[in-house]
Image (cartoon, rainbow, N blue to C red):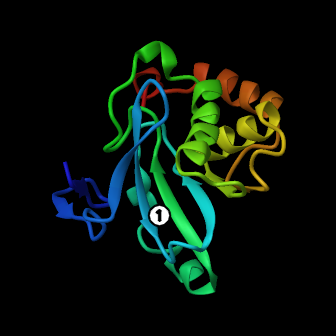
């Protein structure tokens, strides 16, 4: 723990935020959350891509937002990164969307924004659909235009050649 591979997957490197994180209870598990910025700043939950990645994918790219009054909460989603394990049956989009609401409640936020990138965009959008108005703002980064588009992607993957690369 506390180390992540560099972007080429070579050797573990120490991350600069290991002392800034903590576990937050969301009911059936605890999520790892790294906070940056002013404690009284406007909360922005940041949801990483993946699955299988963690908050480190953002590096320090979003840190300039802290100079404008934002409190960044970089979340390792359910059973990923430094978050605690959770039953595999709970690794669903709906449950991860519910985790965002549980995080907001656990941290005592009345208002907050959610930024989801890639797979995190799915979670952010599902959160907006399942819990309308809980997040005051939803920001989607590198998401998909519709579920029909995603179905088309899966059909293309099923036909991808060479066959031995399909799983990758």
Residue lying farthest bottom? 67
Q: Position of residue 121 (x, y in %)?
A: 66, 46
Reply above or below: 26 against 105.
above
Residue lying farthest top? 89
Q: Residue 119, can we see it? A: no
| Left or right, 27 with reference to 147 | left
Q: Residue 66, can we see it? A: yes
Q: Residue at x 61, y 63 (%)?
A: 43
Q: Position of residue 122 (x, y in %)?
A: 67, 39
Residue 155: name its quadrant.
Answer: top right
Reply above or below: 67 against 144.
below
Q: Residue at x 59, y 26 (%)?
A: 95
Reply above or below: 103 against 61.
above
Q: Residue at x 64, y 40 (%)?
A: 101
Q: Which residue is mark 1?
A: 58
| Left or right, 99 with reference to 115 | left
For this rendering, which residue is in front, 139 or 26? 26
Crowd band around label 1 with a 10 angstrom C-alpha radius: few (<14), some (14–19), many (20+):
some
Q: Residue at x 78, y 41 (%)?
A: 128
Local secondary structure at mark 1: helix
For this rendering, which residue is in front, 9 or 57? 57
Q: Position of residue 17 (x, y in %)?
A: 31, 67
| Left or right, 26 with reference to 141 | left
* Quadrant into which the C terminus falls: top left
Q: Position of residue 4 (x, y in %)?
A: 25, 55
| Left or right, 26 with reference to 86 | right
Residue 79: name its quadrant.
Answer: top left
Residue 25: name its quadrant.
Answer: top left
């Amino acid at each position: 723990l506390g180390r992540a591979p560099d972007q080429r997957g070579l050797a573990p490197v120490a991350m600069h935020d290991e002392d800034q994180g903590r576990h937050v209870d969301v009911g059936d598990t605890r999520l790892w959350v790294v906070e940056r910025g002013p404690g009284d700043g406007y909360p922005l939950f940041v949801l990483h891509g993946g699955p299988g990645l963690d908050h480190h994918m953002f590096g320090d790219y979003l840190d300039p937002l802290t100079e404008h009054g934002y409190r960044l909460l970089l979340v390792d989603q359910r059973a990923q990164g430094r978050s605690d394990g959770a039953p595999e049956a709970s690794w669903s989009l709906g449950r991860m969307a519910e985790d965002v609401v549980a995080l907001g409640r656990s941290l005592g936020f009345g208002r907050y924004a959610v930024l989801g990138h890639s797979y995190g965009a799915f979670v952010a959008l599902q959160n907006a659909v399942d819990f309308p108005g809980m997040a005051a703002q939803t920001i989607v980064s590198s998401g998909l235009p519709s579920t029909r588009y995603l179905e088309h992607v899966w059909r293309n993957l099923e036909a991808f050649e060479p066959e031995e690369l399909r799983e990758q």
